[in-house]
Image (cartoon, rainbow, N blue to C red):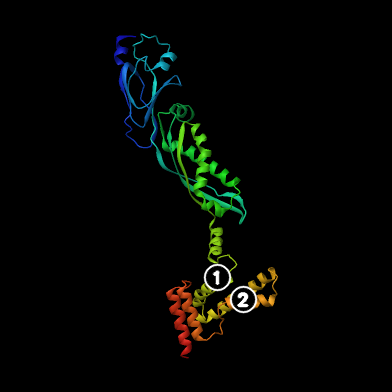
Amino acid sequence: MSLGSFIRKQFIDILQWNEDRDGVLAWRHPMQDFEIQYGASLTVRESQMAVFVNEGKVADVFGPGMYKLTTQTLPILTYLKNWDKLFESPFKSDVIFFSTRLQLGRRWGTAQPVTLRDSEFGMVRLRAFGVYSYQISDPGKFYREISGTRDEYTVDDLEAQLRNMVVAAMTTALGSSKVPFLDIAGNQGLMSQSIGEQLAPVFDRYGVKLDNFTVENVSLPEELQKALDTRISMGMAGDLGKFTQYQTATSIPLAAQNEGGIAGIGAGLAAGAALGQTMAQGLGAAQGQPPQQASQQAPQQAPAAAGADPVQRLQQLKDLLDKGLITAADYDSAKAEVLKQLTH
């Protein structure tokens, strides 16, 4: 080596990473035209690890601390380079720092609905989303499987791959589940734990530790959700009183919007009573009761029809208001209409 080329060479005495930019998981120390001085200082901060790579092979790995780089502290690199115990010359090696901090609050979600057979709703399509957290646990694996020879590897680079694995596991769990949707929605904690256990070894393969996995929401398509809301609103418990109350509550606001005003309430009440009576007859037949007996029971649960006197109408409206089935504005409007009829 000529004196000029020796002078042009630059030697590194201190190796460290300040992590002056967020979201970086792996950072390669600049080594072009540089050599590491024998006995140089290596500083690895808390929540970091450093890896020496020789000709593409992972050599020595360092956790947090300060090190003096010699053949004693670099045993694997010494072996790979065939150094003897008296070696004290500058040397070349790739040095890559890894951030082992927890990456918290990373979001995941199913891009497309997952189709499954539900015991109550038949074929349904579910969506799910949530959060997870992770950290690099084995920088050697991470280098070999993920980051490779890149000068820098970021959280965004990694999560494009992690999210695919998360969604694949979630899709498999939902698609193979025989648990009804209502039970899934009510046991998201158990689902989170189960899927987290499935994902842990998959993440470990890449040198990444899954710290936490949470399913925040499992939802139905909008049209099916509306049907479920209606089912809940009506009780769906075979209570005809609740059913006719529901029919009454929905008919009053609609009638108030029509040309006939509150007069349409009578038709709505009558329709609710008739439908309740029909359902009572059907239930009575299913239970072995004569149709006449079932029909006699139904009117006791149905509100009065349009033929009721004004005092009864006002009382019915007040009951609906007290039960929260109509708004104060609906009540005032209907009351005014009834009183108007009394004065004409």
Give the percent coordinates (x, y) of residue 239. 58, 69
Label of residue 298 in the image: 2
Q: Which residue is mark 1?
A: 242
Q: Label 1, secondary structure: give it.
A: helix
Q: CA distance from mark 1 to mark 2?
A: 12 Å
Taking the image as shown, residue 298 lies to the left or right of residue 160, namely right
Please identify the quarter of the rendering in which residue 53 is found.
top left
Does residue 145 lie above or below 230 as drawn? above
Q: Which of the pair 139/286 is nearer the observer?
A: 286
Give the percent coordinates (x, y) of residue 147. 45, 30
Q: Mark 1 is on which residue type?
A: Lys
Give the percent coordinates (x, y) of residue 315. 48, 81
Label of residue 171 in the image: none
Please identify the quarter of the rendering in which residue 135 is found.
top left
Q: Mark 2 is on which residue type?
A: Ala
Is residue 110 in sight in this rendering? no
Give the percent coordinates (x, y) of residue 108. 47, 44
Does residue 30 lie above or below 124 as drawn? above
Residue at image location 66% in from the left, 70% down from the top:
283
Q: Label 2, secondary structure: give it.
A: helix
Q: Residues within 10 Å of mark 2 (few under 14, many from 20)?
A: many
Does residue 235 lie above or below 185 as drawn? below
Q: Could you tell which of marks 1 and 2 lies nearer the N-terminus?
A: 1
Q: Which of the pair 325/108 is nearer the observer?
A: 325
Residue at image location 42% in from the left, 37% down from the top:
155
